[in-house]
Image (cartoon, coloured by chain):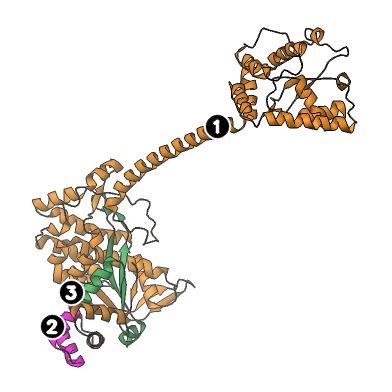
Chain colours: A orange, B green
Amino acid sequence: MQQKITFSEACRLIGRSTGIPRQEVDEFLRSLFEVMEQALIDGESVKLKGIGTFKTTTIAERKSVDVNTGKEIILPAHSKLIFTPAKELAAAVNSPFEAFEAIELTDNISEEDLAAVDNEISETSLQKVETPAETPVAPLAPFLGRENDGVSSAHSSTYSSDETTYIEDDPASLIDDDKHEEECKDKSEEPCNVGSSSAESLDECTEYSHDALEAGEDILNEESEDMEQPVEDEINKATEYINGGNDSSADDIIEEDEPLRHRNNHNSERRKKRRFAFIIGFMCALLLICVAGILILLICPDTANRLRTKLTGPSDVQVESVDTVITSLSRNKQPETKDISIEQASVPHNDEAPKSDDSIAPTSPSDTPVVYDKVTETRYLGTIARHHYGNYFFWPYIYEANPGLGHPDRIKPGTRVKVPDLKQFGIDPHDKAAIEEAKRKEREIYNRYTSVSARRTKKNNKR
Amino acid sequence: MDSKTLIEKAAQRSGTSVDRGRAIVEGFASLLAEGGAELDSVAVPAFGVFEAKKRLERVNVHPATGKRMLLPPKIVMAFKPSALLKQKLKQ
């Protein structure tokens, strides 16, 4: 793709394909081109079968304008070498695009139509075109006459000599025109000095403006329309052609690798594929979100509880009421947490006990006013203990005073817990022994949650 | 100068037979054709470069009928003479 094949590489390839030793190929080709060169210098045209014709023409002196300075310049007379590829070579080189034909554009043609017609293209081919020789010549003459002034006399001469063949093979003739036009473009892109070629091209470009070139081509097209009936039909068929290349940039050749005929198919296919891929991606995303949600619920009952509180409302009320009932009975009835938690879950929200402390207070055995605190995401039992008792380690007493809390580290935020007065138990927060005792209680509580029974408790809690 | 004469002369110069010369020329032509389809260019020293160029599709307007024609893209073989050759031709 877009490789530059060196001469030695070419000789090697030819040697391999013909079986002739590379050295010989090299020598022969060199002498061949030398002979050609000599002939061209002598003013002779050279034709190589299967390759094309090389011809020199003289371009007369001409006035032009220097692009850089804007001054008038005289272009000296000089010779120019023109190469016209042979039919076979031109066709072979264009093989990726051979099925393509020129079509007439109307405003009604939509992409779908073009795409639908795309499939028909492979059937028709311009090579099938038959032509009568006479009519094409005449209309060409004035064009030829004009052309003879300039460089493209090669074109004209080839037309006059090979008119039938050239009109027959539209691609070839179009190639010539294209080449001519392209040469203009190419050369005008070169740095514009007084250099003959560039100025020439400017001249040519102005002389043979787009209109002229198009006229030339269109004359050819016109001729094709003037042709006999079968040809016309052919051309009418040929007028349907895909235009998938509207977005093609003029600069980059390599972009347009794929033949256009496949492009639209690919486009529609790509669209479908894109949609499909999008749907799949969307489903995957949904799946992932669901899986993540489930994982979160499983791993973090804290967050789950949080969600539950938000959804279910003030269930903490139940905790309260149940708590006070239990505390009134006995303090250390831990096994009952199981039942309580079940109860909690099953009991409906509203009724039972009102929120106020008053109804609860009378049941509490202590004389001192009951202290309540709320567990939040940042304020655990330990923090509460520190706040009320001055020592973090006494939280187990709070814990024990509030059965049904579940795992001490995973108490629902917003849970209102009773903070018992340590003096009740006869505990001095600053006493080392008391601290040890509290720590022991802590261990005991945690132990509960590592045993199998704890797992069961957890399960029940979830229910 | 036509093909036959050319090949004869070249064969004479290089000491190859005409048949082999013809085969070589054919091989060269096919090399150009295949390379051209791939947009490759072949360089010949002191002569020039055979380049394959891609022409993008164009919309032309038929001056008489005013119809717009869409010309398909194509690949063409072009020849660029080397500076040396151009120099020689100038003289």
Crowding near pointer 2: few (<14 within 10 Å), some, many (20+)? some
Q: Can residue A359 be seen in the rendering of this structure?
A: yes
Crowding near pointer 1: few (<14 within 10 Å), some, many (20+)? few
What residue is disc 1 on? A293
Residue B52 picture quarter: bottom left
**Residue B16 lies in the magenta stretch:** yes
Residue A83 picture quarter: bottom left
Q: Can residue A392 be seen in the rendering of this structure?
A: no
**Residue A292 lies in the magenta stretch:** no
Work out whether residue A143 or residue A281 is closer to the camera in this orientation and state it.
Answer: A281
Residue A97: mark: none
What residue is disc 2 on? B4
* Badge 1 and badge 3 both on one subunit: yes
Please tell me whether mark 2 sits on a helix, a strand or a loop.
helix
Q: Give the range drawn in magenta.
A: B1-26
Question: Which residue corresponds to the image point at 22% horizontal and 77% vertical from the top-left?
Answer: B28
Amino acid tagged 3:
Gly
Mark 1 and mark 3: span between their CA atoms? 73 Å
Please tell me whether mark 1 sits on a helix, a strand or a loop.
helix
Crowding near pointer 3: few (<14 within 10 Å), some, many (20+)? many
Residue A50: mark: 3
- Disc nearest the viewer among 2 and 1: 1
Residue A398 x %, y % = 79, 23
* The C terminus of chain A, quarter of image: top right
